[in-house]
């Protein structure tokens, strides 16, 4: 809901004035039929009322009534005067007296409806307007009053029916059109609301003009016509340059319209905004990537409220986004000096890292951990800082603590695993990666990490891992990667132990993995090696060729295929494959030089789980 939806009581203000005119005209027409005393009292009271002498007018009316006059026009006028003086209970009595004297006239019901609306008795007001409309179906004020009362009760569709009738009675009437468009808009009939808005002429008085352009803006926004919305809001703001709500709407629609920002796109905001208002504007600009426009608003927020953490973080983001990282770092350093915070230190560390201040970055990450030792993110970030700069010992220490404190965090184990892998502690790496796989067995990224140690483990290293991998494969029978993991581990273990004849088990799991996931080059490669070990050359060739088709850059697939061709005495094919292997192997060695940075990116891709 936009900020220009219904404001309670505003329709009552307009209706009161409309009804006052209608009632005066009605009474004036009836005055000739009154006694001479009633006529004189009425005219005298009306003149006093029109001159603003409400109390004197009331005295004249009361004198006539006390003298025995029972004229509905005097009671009606008395109710209007009481209402103006804030004497609502007396006004209600007077209007109900009018109804009792003229029960089939709309006059008493309409004025009673206005009064009841004013005091918030909306259901009663709607009932009074219904009665008026019952006796005079085309009574404009009764229709308008009933529609606005129903609208205030959030009965939008029903309200629109009666407001449409009021509009039909007086096509082009501003208040009827405005309320009808508003009801249609609240009923989500946006196109219909726009059609009515387009038929209303912009009024001349400033207050109504503001209302008109504001409603035009909000309806255009509903229809995602943001350029038109911004134009309407701009017109409203030009009339009321102190309106914060209109300015926010102007900013919002201008951003949505995709205007290229410059200093001339938006007018200046209202003066003397609160910190909360400046922050709202700043966040609006940030949400649209208008960081330069966000900075002044966020700076003003902090000037008014120096401890506003959200404004601080948002201003840091804005500075960084416009290339003013030193300003962002300076702001954070001043902030942590006054208000040490783990979140701020962690944010500062990231900026230090990006700026090449690695020592400062480590110190800030450490400080974040010290201030909030129960935050998994901070341990991960500190360990990642060590990993990314090849200080693997400290990284292993951090992740070692992290796995103890956060035993359900797979990424802590990934970090620990890569810390060991980087210094060739493959058994320890395999242990960490397997634990990560047990925590998050459906994660392709965790599985990719586990595969890195597959070719580096000694036979004794598989002894404790195999039961765990078997359990994982059994617990997730439709997971091709876990079937591959157990099958490949079992195959290598049996081969290392000289048990070439005991390959039925690993073969069944590897065949299952390619059956569950045909596009799985590693599984085809491993299955080809198993067939080769069983002297089933042609089946091995088929699997190696499929692995190469799926991963043409696989140097090991070309090598093993070449070996099988040689064993099959297909020497020309073997030579071709081995030559391709040598070419790819050289390229692979060059890529390995950049592998450490790839490790950083790989681990960073592991987002924190919601329950960590």
Image: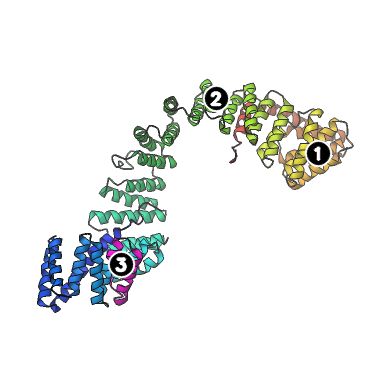
Asked where in the image residue 39 lies, by quadrant, the reply is bottom left
Dominant secondary-structure state across the stretch colored magenta: helix
The reply to whether residue 172 is visible in this rendering is no
Q: In this image, 461 relative to 398: left or right?
A: right
Residue closer to the observer: 267 or 344: 344
Seen from this angle, which residue lies furthest right?
501
Whether tag 2 and tag 3 are in contact, CB under 8 A, the answer is: no
> Could you tell me which quadrant the C terminus lies in?
top right
Give the secondary structure at mark 2: helix
Mark 1 crowd level (few <14, some 14–19, many ≥20, 10 Å Cα): many
Q: What residue range appears in magenta?
A: 113-141
Q: Is residue 265 above or below residue 595?
A: below
**Mark 1 and mark 3: span between their CA atoms?**
83 Å
For marks 2 and 1, give the one nearer the viewer: 2
Mark number, residue 366? 2
**Mark 2 and mark 3: span between their CA atoms?**
68 Å
Q: Earlier in the sequence, mark 2 or mark 3?
A: 3
Q: Which residue is mark 1?
A: 528
Q: Position of residue 334 (x, y in %)?
A: 42, 25
Mark number, residue 376? none
For marks 1 and 3, give the one nearer the viewer: 3
Residue closer to the observer: 446 or 20: 20
Q: In this image, 99 relative to 612: left or right?
A: left
Q: Which residue is mark 3?
A: 144
Q: Position of residue 59 (x, y in %)?
A: 13, 65
Q: In this image, 212 relative to 384: left or right?
A: left
Q: Residue at x 23, y 69 (%)?
A: 94
Residue closer to the observer: 596 or 539: 596
**Mark 2 and mark 1: span between their CA atoms?**
48 Å
Asked where in the image residue 511 lies, by quadrant, the reply is top right
Q: Residue at x 44, y 42 (%)?
A: 287
């Amino acid at each position: 809901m936009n900020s220009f939806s219904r404001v309670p009581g505003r329709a009552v203000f307009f209706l009161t004035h409309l009804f006052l005119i209608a009632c005066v005209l009605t009474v004036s027409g009836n005055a000739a039929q009154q006694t001479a005393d009633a006529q004189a009292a009425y005219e005298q009271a009306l003149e006093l009322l029109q001159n603003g002498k409400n109390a004197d007018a009331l005295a004249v009316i009361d004198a006539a009534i006390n003298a025995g006059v029972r004229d509905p026009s005097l009671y009606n006028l008395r109710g209007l005067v009481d209402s103006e003086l804030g004497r609502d209970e007396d006004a209600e009595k007077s209007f109900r007296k009018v109804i009792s004297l003229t029960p089939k006239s709309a006059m008493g019901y309409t004025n009673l409806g206005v009064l009841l609306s004013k005091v918030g008795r909306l259901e009663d007001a709607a009932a009074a307007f219904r009665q008026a409309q019952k006796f005079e179906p085309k009574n404009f004020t009764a229709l308008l009053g009933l529609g606005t009362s129903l609208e205030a009760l959030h009965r939008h569709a029903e309200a629109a029916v009666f407001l449409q009738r009021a509009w039909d009675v007086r096509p082009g009437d501003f208040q009827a059109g405005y309320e009808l468009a508003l009801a249609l808009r609240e009923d989500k009939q946006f196109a219909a609301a726009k059609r009515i808005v387009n038929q209303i002429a912009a009024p001349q008085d400033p207050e109504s003009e503001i209302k008109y352009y504001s409603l035009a803006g909000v309806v255009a926004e509903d229809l995602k016509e943001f350029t038109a919305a911004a134009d309407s809001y701009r017109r409203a703001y030009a009339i009321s340059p102190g309106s914060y709500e209109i300015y926010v709407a102007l900013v919002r629609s201008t951003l949505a319209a995709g205007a290229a920002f410059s200093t001339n796109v938006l007018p200046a905001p209202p003066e003397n905004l609160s910190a909360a208002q400046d922050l709202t504007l700043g966040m609006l600009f940030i949400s649209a990537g208008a960081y330069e426009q966000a900075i002044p608003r966020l700076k003003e927020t902090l000037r008014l409220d120096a401890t506003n953490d959200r404004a601080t973080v948002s201003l840091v983001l804005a500075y960084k986004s416009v290339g003013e990282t030193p300003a962002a770092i300076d702001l954070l350093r001043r902030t942590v000096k006054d208000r040490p915070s783990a979140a701020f230190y962690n944010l500062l560390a990231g900026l230090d890292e990006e700026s090449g201040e690695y020592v400062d970055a480590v110190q800030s990450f450490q400080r974040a951990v010290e201030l909030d030792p129960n935050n998994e993110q901070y341990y991960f970030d500190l360990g990642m800082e060590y990993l990314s700069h090849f200080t693997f010992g400290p990284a292993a220490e951090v992740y070692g603590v992290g796995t103890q404190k956060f035993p359900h965090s797979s990424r802590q184990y990934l970090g620990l695993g890569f810390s060991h892998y980087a210094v060739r502690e493959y058994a320890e790496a395999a242990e960490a990666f397997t634990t990560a796989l047990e925590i998050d067995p459906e994660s392709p990224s965790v599985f990719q990490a586990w595969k890195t140690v597959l070719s580096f483990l000694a036979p004794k290293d598989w002894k404790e891992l195999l039961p765990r991998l078997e359990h994982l494969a059994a617990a997730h029978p439709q997971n091709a990667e876990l079937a591959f993991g157990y099958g490949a581990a079992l195959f290598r273990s049996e081969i290392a132990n000289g048990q070439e004849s005991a390959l039925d088990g690993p073969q069944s799991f590897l065949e299952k993995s390619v059956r569950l996931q045909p596009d799985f080059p590693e599984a085809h490669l491993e299955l080809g090696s198993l067939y080769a070990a069983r002297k089933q050359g042609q089946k091995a060739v088929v699997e190696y060729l499929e692995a190469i088709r799926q991963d043409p850059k696989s140097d090991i697939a070309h090598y093993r295929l070449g070996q099988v061709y040689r064993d099959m005495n297909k020497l020309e094919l073997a030579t071709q494959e081995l030559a391709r292997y040598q070419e790819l192997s050289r390229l692979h060695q060059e890529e390995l030089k950049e592998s450490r940075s790839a490790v950083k990116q790989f681990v960073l891709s592991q987002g924190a789980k919601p329950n960590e």
